[in-house]
Image (cartoon, rainbow, N blue to C red):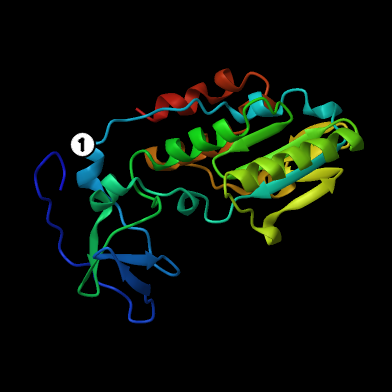
Amino acid sequence: MVCGMAVWQCGRATDPGRRASRCATQSGQSELYLGQFTSPAFPWAARHALGRRAHTPHRAESFLGMSEDKYFSKLDLTKGYHQIRVRPSDVHKTAFVTMGQHYEFLRMPFGMVNSGMTMTRAVRRLLEGMDNVVDYIDDLLVHTKTWEEHLQVLEELFKRLKAANLVARPTKCELGATQVDFLGHCLGRGTVGLQDCNVEKVKDAPRPTTKKEIRSFLGLVGYYQPFIPNFAAIAAPLSGGES
């Protein structure tokens, strides 16, 4: 139900090989552990949701001053969005139908208009006052100049994660490194640069010939704008081709 009006959706076709993991019914409400479910979109909810915004700094802002840092640790929060519970009074707004059954998300799904901002705001509250930690949705980066400081920051971060019941994925974490790749950048050893694989993507990108290809190419190279002197002037001829 959205704004007092019931919203109906046709059942979704589902690959027989992909099954939802179901568990016991509690208080008349089916609980679903989202093991292999594809996250649905919620266009009806997006139209009525109040848009919330959280400032996400440009990557160049996040990496300013890191060239002097010597130790890095990066953490990935497991299934980030799904670690945030949906308010009980809003659970019904996430309803969807598949395999002939009605389901509702008890944890925040992908696809809701405010999912990304909600995750960002939650992480920002968690990291308040921790100037040596950079966040991007569910990715965290600890950066310090000394090993002693690094251990102190990690200890405080782990305490906060535990208190908030947030879990990191061990296989995607890297602790105490002198150089790391993070969000397309290579950090450490006195430099802030680009990952070689992404440089190759730019070098090997085909010459754009359509408006769609131009937009795609500008998006690719624009991410690294801080590393390209006079980027606006160089890209101006292509930018004009977008319109």
Q: Residues within 10 Å of mark 1 (few under 14, many from 20)?
A: few
- The answer to whether one can see residue 154 in this image is yes
**Residue 184 visible in the snapshot:** no
Q: Which residue is found at the position 61% from the left and 53% from the top?
A: 167
Q: Residue furthest bottom?
A: 16
Q: Which image quarter holds the C terminus? A: top left
- Left of 227 or right of it: where is 240? left
Could you tell me which residue is drawn at 70 percent across and 50 percent down? 197
Name of the residue lying farthest toward the left: 5
Residue 92, position as x, y percentages in the image? 23, 52
x, y percent for residue 183: 64, 42
Say which residue appears at 44% left-offset and 35% top-offset: 117
Near-viewer residue (86 or 65): 86
Q: Residue at x 41, y 65 (%)?
A: 34
**In-front residue for pair 210/87:** 87
- Above or below, 91 against 34 in this view is above
Q: Which secondary structure lies at badge 1?
A: helix
68 left or right of 155? Answer: right
Q: Quadrant of residue 222?
A: top right
Establish if 52 lies above or below 86. Answer: above
Q: Please state the horizontal and vertical placement of residue 35, each as a whole percent of the image.
A: 45, 69
Left or right side of 209 for 180: right
Residue 73 is situated, as x and y percent measured from the top left of the image, at 77, 44
Residue designated by label 1: 48
Asked whether 9 or 216 is in front, the reply is: 9
Give, as a three-letter code, the residue at label 1: His
Total marks drawn? 1
Q: Does 3 sit left or right of 159 as displayed?
A: left
